[in-house]
Image (cartoon, rainbow, N blue to C red):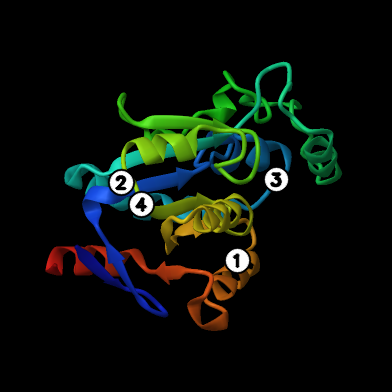
Amino acid sequence: MAKVETYTHLFELPLEDTALLIIDMQNDFCHPDGFNGSELNLDLTSIRAIIPSIQTLLDWSRKLGLMVIFTRESHPPNLSDLTSSKQQRYTNAGSPIGELGKMGRFLVQGEKGVEIIDELRPLPHEIQLDKPAHSCFVNTQLDHKLQNQNITHLIIVGVTTQCCVLATYRHASDLGYYCLLLDDCCATFDRADHDATIRILQSEGGVLGWVAHSSMLYHDSLAH
């Protein structure tokens, strides 16, 4: 049983019951030629900066034999699972789902833009989970997959902090999972949004959950 010092309270981490959840580190969001970089001209500096930290975390998780799950925000080519509300929201933001970019249609399965970035290439046995919503648990088999492996604890990282990361964290917590967010392994396009989300997760004395720096995970898991 590893014991991780977080910014608020001690987090007990039974490694044999823990999975690493890497959220949406896909080309559309993280690669300069992806839709957000090439079509929306968003600043990817913060997004690209967390890649080495996630690489270290991924190597650590693989060495310990943790279950590793990569998620990809995506929809089938006919957009059959895309709600009209989500389509309208993304269109309002200037990123209509299905729009053509340098890496194919935005957030459409089978396109290069949906693939996980090369720096974090999944191994053949690792799960790649396509999700149609911000939370990884909406209309997916994630909860079922985790329960089948007796997973009770989640280490959550990825992009973007205030959107899919937070939505997944809150949903997982409500489902009863113990969740640890590593703030140096999460990012968004606007640092202020990231910082605000980290403050929110530590608000009300820690009632919402646990947040730590990844260095504390390695230090404390090895110490115990």
Amino acid at circle 3? Asn
From the image, state whether disc 4 or disc 2 is nearer to you.
4
Question: Could you say which disc has been placed on residue 58 in the image?
Answer: 2
Amino acid at circle 2? Leu
What element does badge 3 sit on?
A: loop
Disc 1 to disc 2, C-alpha distance: 23 Å
Disc 1 to disc 4, C-alpha distance: 30 Å
Lower position in the chain sequence, tag 1 or tag 2: 2
Lower position in the chain sequence, tag 3 or tag 2: 3
Looking at the picture, tell me which residue is in the foreground, 31 or 87: 87
Looking at the picture, tell me which residue is in the foreground, 128 or 10: 10
Instruction: Identify the residue shown where x is 62% and y is 59%.
Output: 162
- Give the quarter of the figure containing the C terminus: bottom left
Instruction: Identify the residue shown where x is 82% and y is 44%.
Output: 89
- Give the quarter of the figure containing the N terminus: bottom left
Lower position in the chain sequence, tag 4 or tag 2: 2
**In this image, 8 relative to 172: left or right?**
left
From the image, state whether disc 3 or disc 1 is nearer to you.
1
Disc 3 to disc 4, C-alpha distance: 39 Å
Amino acid at circle 4? Thr
Say above or below: 107 vs 164. Answer: above
Q: Residues within 10 Å of mark 4 (few under 14, many from 20)?
A: some
Q: Residue 46: horizontal and vertical position, in percent?
A: 53, 58
Q: Quadrant of residue 150?
A: top left
What element does badge 2 sit on?
A: helix
Q: Residue 2: horizontal and vertical position, in percent?
A: 21, 64
Residue wearing tag 1? 191
Residue wearing tag 3? 41
Question: Could you say which disc has been placed on residue 152 in the image?
Answer: 4
Q: Residue 83: horizontal and vertical position, in percent?
A: 78, 33
